[in-house]
Amino acid sequence: MRYYIADLHFFHENLNTKMDKRGFANVNAMNDYMLKQWNSKVRNRDEVVILGDLSWGKSEETNQLLQKLNGRLYLIQGNHDYGIHMPEYRACFQEITSYKKIHDSLQEKPQLVILSHYYMPFYENHYYGSVLLHGHSHMSPESDLERQITANLISQGITERIYNIGCMYPYMDYTPRTLEEIIRSVHKNWWKTT
C-alpha cells in the first residue's frame, strides 16, 4: 500500500501553539499523537511519501523518530527538511527528491500523480486528469488563496485535481492516506472559499 502526507513538523512547538494552532497540550503530546496515528495505519511493508517538512527536531531527535515510523519512507523535500545531507538521515529514506511524478491507482485504474511540497496551479498533464498532491501552506491565508486559484482553474476547465495533504486538514487527521482515501475524503467543493 502507498500512503501520502505532508507538513507533520514533528518537534515544532510554534506550529502547535501559534502558526497552525493545532491545540495539543504541548509538542510532546503532538508528537505522540502523530506517531500513534501513523503507526496505527502504516505497516512496515507499506510505502509512505512525505511531501516535505517532516521534522523541526535536531538531527538526533529526527533520527530517533525515523526509527519509530513504520513503512518504507520517501521524501519530497520541503523548505524545513534540514539535515537531509547527513548520511544517517538519508539512510532512513528509500529516496529523497524535490519533485516526482509517479503512477498510482485510482479506482483500479492507473493515475499520474505529481508530487511536490509546493502548490503549482499548472502542473504536468493538468489538462489531462493528472493529480497534484502538495503541502507547504498549512491552513493559512496562502492556502485560502490556493483554493481561490484552484476554484477559478476548475471553473475554466483547466484542472480539477489539486489536493493539499497537509497533516492538519480534517481529512488527513495526522494520518498518512492513500490516493483513493484523499480523493474520496475531500468534499468535491473543498476548494470553494466561504
Image (cartoon, helix red, strand yellow):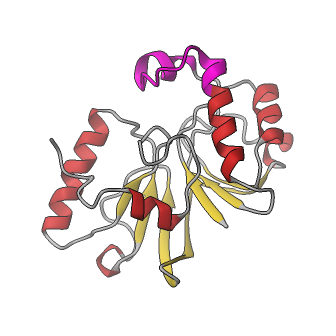
Q: Residue 44 sits in which quadrant?
A: bottom right
In the image, residue 14 lies in the stretch drawn in magenta: yes
- As for residue 128 lying within the magenta part, the answer is no
20 displayed left or right of 90 = left
* Residue 14 picture location, percent across and down: 51, 17
Front residue of this view, candidates 189 and 62: 189
Asked if residue 108 is positioned above or below residue 170 in the image, the reply reads below
Q: Is residue 3 left or right of residue 125?
A: right
Image location of residue 182, percent across then percent down: 45, 59
Q: Is residue 86 visible?
A: no
Q: Which residue: 55% across, 56% down?
A: 177
> With respect to residue 48, does 11 lie above or below?
above
Give coordinates of residue 38: x percent, y percent: 66, 44
Query: Residue visible at 43% across and 48% down?
Result: 171
Quadrant hosting residue 155: bottom left
Magenta segment's dominant SS is: helix
Residue range highlighted in magenta: 13-30
Residue 10 lies left or right of residue 190; in this view the side is: right
Residue at screen point 53% across, 46% down:
6
Q: How many marks?
A: 0
Q: Nearer the viewer, residue 182 or 59?
A: 182
Instruction: Give the residue furthest to the bottom.
Output: 109
Instruction: Say whether residue 117 is visible.
Output: yes
Quarter placement of the N terminus: bottom right
**Percent x, y of residue 3:** 61, 59
**164 relative to 27, above or below:** below
Tell which residue pokes out farthest to the front in this image.
40
The residue at 77%/49% (across/down) is 70
Q: Is residue 88 left or right of residue 111?
A: right
The quadrant the C terminus occupies is top left
